[in-house]
Amino acid sequence: MRSILKATAVSLATLVALAGPASAELTGNLKINLDTSNPAPRATMEALIAKFQSANPALNITTNIIDREAYKTQIRNFLSADAPDVLNWYAANRMKPYVNAGLLEDVSDMWADGTSIANELASTKGALTIDGKQWGVPYTYYQWGIYYRKDIYEELGLNEPANFDEMLSNCEAMLASGRKCYTIGNKYLWTGAGWFDYLNLRTNGFDFHMQMAAGEIEWTDQRVRKTFENWGKLIRMGAFIDDNQNKAWQESLPFIIDGSAGAILMGNFAVAPMRDGGLTDDQLDFHQFPAITPGIAMAEDAPTDTFHIAAKAKNKDNARAFLAYIVSADAQTEMNNGANLGQLPINSEASVDDDKFLKQGFEMLSSNSPGGVAQFFDRDFPAEMAQAAMEGMQEFMVFPDNLDDILERLESVRQDVY
């Protein structure tokens, strides 16, 4: 932590306080809003905040942990009417509406050239930058991919699929055994967007996907239709669990835990609850989403989670001190280990935990994603476009024959949004 403190641009008082001497401890208040309502993230953040509190006993810290889905609808209101000092959120387009509305603090001073943040978190600076300024700091990122029941695959004589034909063939065998191929809970839409991301990245490639995010591709384009046609092959063969549009992602996990589904496309945060549900690392394994169009470079989703200071925060020096603490190599090593978040640290000086899935994810993102790394559908696409598209994707998973109407509707939204 001291190496961060030597170079960040927070005030001298803040630096001294973070270094620990009791005489320079932070005082006053610090109000933190979090959406880390799931058990593992909640425990991780509470432990990290407790350490910060221990180092600064004169500081009065109030933490509000809000249900993750409710947080998404409340964030604009609390930033406007009852602002915390610090809040967690997401990089790229997901923070843009709040930056444009003047609700987040410019923290470009913390990213100034020569600071530890600039040096050690450089890979994510672009995702935190809007109009040439930085609006938060990152604390974790994580791989997406397919987590599957290795024991069931072995029972059925299946291998990790190398291409889409093998993916479909595996699915046929899984269905023949009386199981579903994939579990998904798409009540809150973003899990279906994960499927679109991967099918589009594999069908048309990273550059095309990002052109779509920028509004440069019509939703009625034949290449977009091809992505949905590939998705439709899985839907029509019955690959996904029934009634998935009415389940949260957590409610979809019992299907892979009890073996009634063979796999799930998800971020690495799902490993902890699957382990808690009883799956061992001998039963559970991970593979990269397989290639679809030959010659398309493999690209991945690796969302970056972030902390921000509210523009209306009352204790901005304390907030900056907390952000400096949360991006330090020590804090990021601890929070991201397999026993806590089970994700990957952003800080280049932090250590990746000796965990099976973290090692697989780090290896995949470091050496086998030459096509590029996307944030995630609802972070890469503007909010209004993302919401309409995810609603269309949910409808498509239930009524695939509605594709023409869905794409026409989304094209109309695209013309309004961009």
Image (spheres, grey):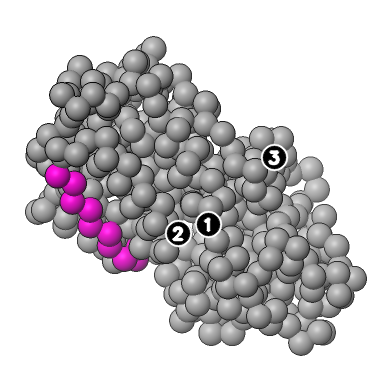
Please tell me whether residue 68 belongs to the stretch shown in magenta: yes
The residue where tag 3 is placed is 363
Labels 2 & 3 near each other (Cβ < 8 A): no
Res. 269 mark: 1
Tell whether 140 sits left or right of 169: left
In front of the other: 345 or 311: 345
The residue where tag 2 is placed is 40
State the separation of the CA atoms marked 3 and 1. 17 Å
State the separation of the CA atoms marked 2 and 3. 24 Å
Q: Earlier in the sequence, mark 3 or mark 1?
A: 1
Tell whether 260 sits left or right of 26: right
Q: As drawn, which residue projects farthest toward the bottom?
A: 178
Res. 175 mark: none
Q: Magenta segment, which residues?
A: 60-69
In front of the other: 315 or 59: 59
Return the x and y of residue 311 as percentages of the image width and height.
16, 39
Tell whether 25 sits left or right of 264: left
Q: Can you say whether 39 is above or below 232 in the image?
A: above
- SS for callout 2: helix
Q: Amino acid at mark 1?
A: Phe
Labels 1 & 2 near each other (Cβ < 8 A): yes
Q: Earlier in the sequence, mark 1 or mark 2?
A: 2
Q: Amino acid at mark 2?
A: Ala
Q: Specify the principal SS of the magenta part.
A: strand
Local crowd size for mark 2, using a 10 Å CA cut-off: few (<14), some (14–19), many (≥20):
some
Residue at horizontal 62 percent and vertical 79 percent from the top: 255
Residue at horizontal 17 percent and vertical 31 percent from the top: 26
